[in-house]
């Protein structure tokens, strides 16, 4: 959640993410912080390099969790969450799940207590459907590498 809030603050996003507005803000930030605007060796050039990387990463991250992106990929997401869970790991408040079809998703805001319950569940997919899949912000981080 900290990462989401940090990127929303960087792009001045209040509530819902609007892709058109996000793209405009992204372009303006890139123009402002492009490393080529500064001379090599300048202290601002180093700061601009770091800031431009942060802007690019933030843009791709926010696009991946935007409602429009989720709506466009909803069918694929529903197919994936109905396949068995192969692997899962928890870091901070982020739960990363890999499914049998090869897709990997991140779920944000999943606390340790819920993660422990997931691990102790005898039916992982059923537990996750009821408690995680439709309750937490998610994004796809790896595409399927399995040939169907």
Image (cartoon, rainbow, N blue to C red):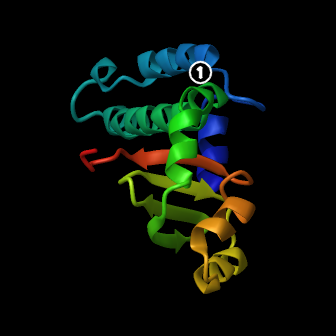
142 up-or-down from 124: above or below: above
- Between 7 and 16, the one lying in front of the other is 16
- Which residue of the protein is positioned furthest toward the bottom in this rendering? 120
Residue occupying image coordinates x 51% and y 15%:
28
Indicate the position of residue 48 as horizontal and vertical percent values: 38, 32
- Which residue of the protein is positioned furthest toward the right in this rendering? 15
User: Left of 37 or right of it: where is 95?
Assistant: right
Indicate the position of residue 11 as horizontal and vertical percent values: 61, 29
- Tell me the quadrant of the picture where the C terminus can be found: top left
Residue that badge 1 annotates: 22
Residue occupying image coordinates x 56% and y 26%:
72
- Tell me the quadrant of the picture where the N terminus can be found: bottom right
Using a 10 Å C-alpha cutoff, classify the residue at mark 1 as few (fewer than 14 neighbours), some (14 to 19) or many (20 or more): some
Residue occupying image coordinates x 50% and y 49%:
80
Classify mark 1: helix, strand or loop: helix
Residue occupying image coordinates x 33% and y 47%:
144
Indicate the position of residue 141 as horizontal and vertical percent values: 43, 48
137 up-or-down from 8: above or below: below
- Which residue of the protein is positioned furthest toward the front in this rendering? 148
Indicate the position of residue 38 as horizontal and vertical percent values: 31, 23
Q: Quadrant of residue 45?
A: top left
141 up-or-down from 13: above or below: below
- Between 131 and 67, the one lying in front of the other is 131
């Amino acid at each position: 959640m900290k990462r989401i809030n940090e990127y929303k603050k960087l792009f001045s996003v209040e509530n819902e993410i609007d892709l058109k507005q996000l793209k405009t803000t992204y372009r303006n930030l890139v123009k402002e912080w492009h490393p080529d605007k500064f001379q090599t060796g300048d202290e601002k050039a180093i700061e601009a390099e770091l800031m431009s990387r942060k802007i690019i990463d933030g843009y791709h991250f926010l696009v991946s969790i935007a409602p429009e992106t989720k709506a466009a990929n909803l069918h694929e997401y529903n197919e994936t969450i109905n396949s068995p869970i192969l692997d899962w790991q928890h870091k901070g408040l982020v739960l990363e799940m890999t499914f049998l079809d090869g897709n990997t998703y991140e779920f944000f805001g999943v606390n340790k207590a819920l993660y422990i319950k997931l691990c102790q569940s005898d039916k992982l997919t059923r537990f996750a459907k009821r408690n995680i899949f439709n309750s937490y912000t998610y994004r796809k981080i790896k595409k399927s590498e399995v040939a169907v």
